[in-house]
Amino acid sequence: MTAHRSTDALHDEWLVVRLQQGDRAAAGELAANWQPRLMRTARRYLGEEAGVEASVQESWVAILRGVGGLRDPSRFAPWAFGILRRKCTDRVRQAVRDRGRTAELEDAPIAQQQEDTTAIRAAMASLPPDQRFAAQLFYIEGLTLAEIAEAQDVPQGTAKSRLFHARRKLKAALSGDDQ
């Protein structure tokens, strides 16, 4: 699996370099490769379907506008996930502001928790957003601790702590123990 990931990473680097040189076909191929990963991660981060597509779309706009400034194409994954995190965070903040304006909802249950029937999805959904994002990037996307820290724009020790607490909470939730 490591060789497969390395091949994928090298291919992504090549696509980024081509994109930086103005190759529009590379943009399409990069988007085709990365769209499922960004959608899956946005769903986990937002905990609901509403806003996922818009957040990913906004992320692609920022990625395509900013890719020319990406100095190291091998850092594409944490850079792209960092952009996605900021766009999803903006969406969450907007939803909180909207709730405050309408004052209709006190604590709306997350739609994802109601719909998901598997224990893993429910456990992931119960994590705080920063821990959920770290766990998603580590377990699902296969990023290293350094890449997670970069994507979350935090020191590596903070990323390690978030991942540690996420693991502990996931283990407790999946084993049925109280935290």
Image (cartoon, rainbow, N blue to C red):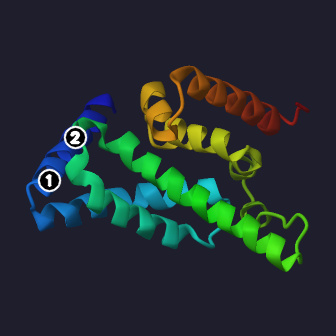
Q: Is 177 placed left or right of 139 in the picture?
A: right
As rendered, which of 119 and 152 lies closer to the eye? 152
Residue that label 2 marks = 73
- At label 1, counting other C-alpha atoms closer than 10 Å, the crowd grade (few under 14, some 14-19, many 20 or more) is some
- The image shows residue 158, relative to residue 7, as above or below, that is above
Identify which amino acid the numbered label 2 is placed on: Pro
Residue at image position (55%, 67%) is 52
Q: Is 179 placed left or right of 66 in the picture?
A: right
- At label 2, counting other C-alpha atoms closer than 10 Å, the crowd grade (few under 14, some 14-19, many 20 or more) is many
Asked if the residue under mark 2 is in contact with the one under mark 1, i.e. CB atoms within 8 Å, the reply is: yes
Image location (x, y in percent) of residue 162:
65, 30
- The image shows residue 23, relative to residue 161, as above or below, that is below
Residue that label 1 marks = 20
Residue at image position (59%, 71%) is 51
Q: Quadrant of residue 4?
A: top left
Image location (x, y in percent) of residue 156:
52, 23
